[in-house]
Image: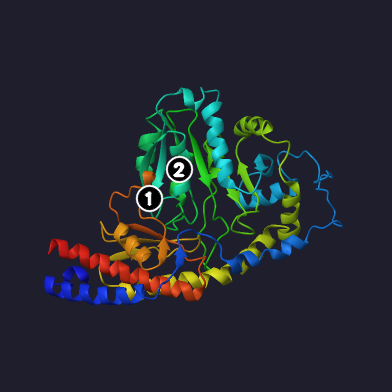
Amino acid sequence: MDFQAMSREELSQVKQELENRYHEVQALGLNLNMARGKPSEEQVELSMPMLDTLNSRSKMTASNGEDCRNYGMADGLPELRLLFAEMMGVDDHNIIVGGNSSLNMMFDVISCAMTHGFSDCEPWMHQGHLKFLCPAPGYDRHFAITEYFGMELIPIEMTPEGPNMDEVERWVNNDPQVKGIWCVPKYSNPQGYTYSDETVRRFAALQPAARDFRIFWDNAYCVHDLTNTPDELLNLWYECRKTHNIDLPIFFASTSKITFPGAGVAAVGASEVNLAILRKHYSYQTIGPDKLNQLRHIYFLRDMEGVKAQMQRHRKVIAPKFEIVLSKLSDHLGGKGIAEWTNPNGGYFVSVQVLDGCARRVVQLCKEAGVQLTGAGAAYPYGKDPRDSNIRLAPTYPPVSELEVAMDLFCLCTELAAAEKLLETK
């Protein structure tokens, strides 16, 4: 029954029933965690054979003949650059393969822009009050980087087509203090949206008021499909070539959710102009990346077909978990007028919109009954959801048995918070 159509008496009765059920669950002493999009132990096990690909008898040279045990190859192994080129849709000579963290590479690019600048412009730190566009709901760790550097975070509405491009163009094309925008273009965090072709073309056609404006294109889920009908993302690299805007985008990807999250490899892709600045920046940090780890990845994944095979193995583990989440939401909350949710074709999250003013209460109720969720508001700049309605669910980490229990509790808490809220207005 639609909660919003109930009388005050009906709502009061439902609330009492929900509270009774909630206290029963509290008594179970649960201790479950759905707070972050971590691969499960079963997923991490999929990459254990990679550790056996390199031993004292292995060939330690890259395809160009260089010894991977020694200094050098600052751009990474040529064969791994080729693999990332296919994953990211960027030419291999425009890619630097680094350490295990793409987030670290994003931080480094922002840091480089702050201290040394882009496009022969003054360093960002000398340009006064800076602004950065943040499609929201979005990735909290993206927002944290630019907040750390003291920029003003500008929320941009997210739609099923991607960021609201009318808003993006208004800010970018008219305000020289806007220096960049965060993007997760395929299976966005947390909604699982993939940018439409029109959105990608409008990004490529931007005419920024600031010559040193950059698009931070974090394609973290570029191969993380969950269905037989995966989303297709238009190639921004080639679209920017058409519009002569090749310096606009900087691309990022990693194997964090392909192999080992803590011991993968990450890559950045950009134009020659941008890479010249970044190579100089990196030259003061390191004489070369961990090429043995890069070699290990090549021996294990080999090529794009190997990546696809690995992702099929991941899909067998996590697709049933997404089915559980979506089934529980539909069974418990469908038709009650108190929640909506996304049904992504890939990625790592399901985004739920509960009644306005209820997200923090739902998260609190879950925590007090033993289930940890991502904090309400985390997907917005400064952690402030203006409607207090968005909750990010991360199905991948818990075992199936725990996930079912956690989702039953989440739905119960969503109903209870909604009943409480609606009774305030009856």
The picture places residue 6, in percent across and down from the top left corner, at 16, 72
Residue placed most toward the observer, 387 or 398: 398
Image height of 153 relative to 383, above or below: above
Q: How is the image coloured?
A: rainbow
The quadrant in which the C terminus is found is bottom left
Check residue 71 in the rendering and tell me which mark sits there, or answer none.
none
Q: Secondary structure at mark 1?
A: strand
For label 1, the crowd category at 10 Å Cα-Cα, with few meaning under 14, some 14 to 19 and many 20 or more, is: some
Q: Nearer the viewer, residue 376 or 204?
A: 376
Q: Is residue 82 left or right of residue 378?
A: right
Q: Residue at x 49, y 71 (%)?
A: 321
Residue at screen point 69% across, 32% down? 283
* Disc 2 secondary structure class: helix
For marks 1 and 2, give the CA distance: 18 Å
State whether residue 104 appears in this view: yes
Q: Nearer the viewer, residue 346 or 4?
A: 4
Lateral position of residue 167 relative to residue 338, left or right? right
Vertical order, 290 against 206 (above or below): below
The kind of residue on which mark 1 rests is Met
Q: Amino acid at mark 2?
A: Ala
In-image side of 259 versus 234 (left or right): right
Which of pointers 1 and 2 lies earlier in the amino acid sequence?
2
Quadrant of the rendering where the N terminus is positioned: bottom left
Image quadrant where residue 48 sits:
bottom right
- Where in the figure is residue 155, as x and y percent of width and height? 36, 43
Which quadrant of the figure has residue 222? bottom right
**Residue 268 in picture, x, y percent from top left:** 61, 43
Per the rendering, the mark at residue 144 is: 2
- The image quarter containing residue 419 is bottom left
Check disc 1 and report the residue beneath it.
158
Q: Is residue 259 left or right of residue 8?
A: right
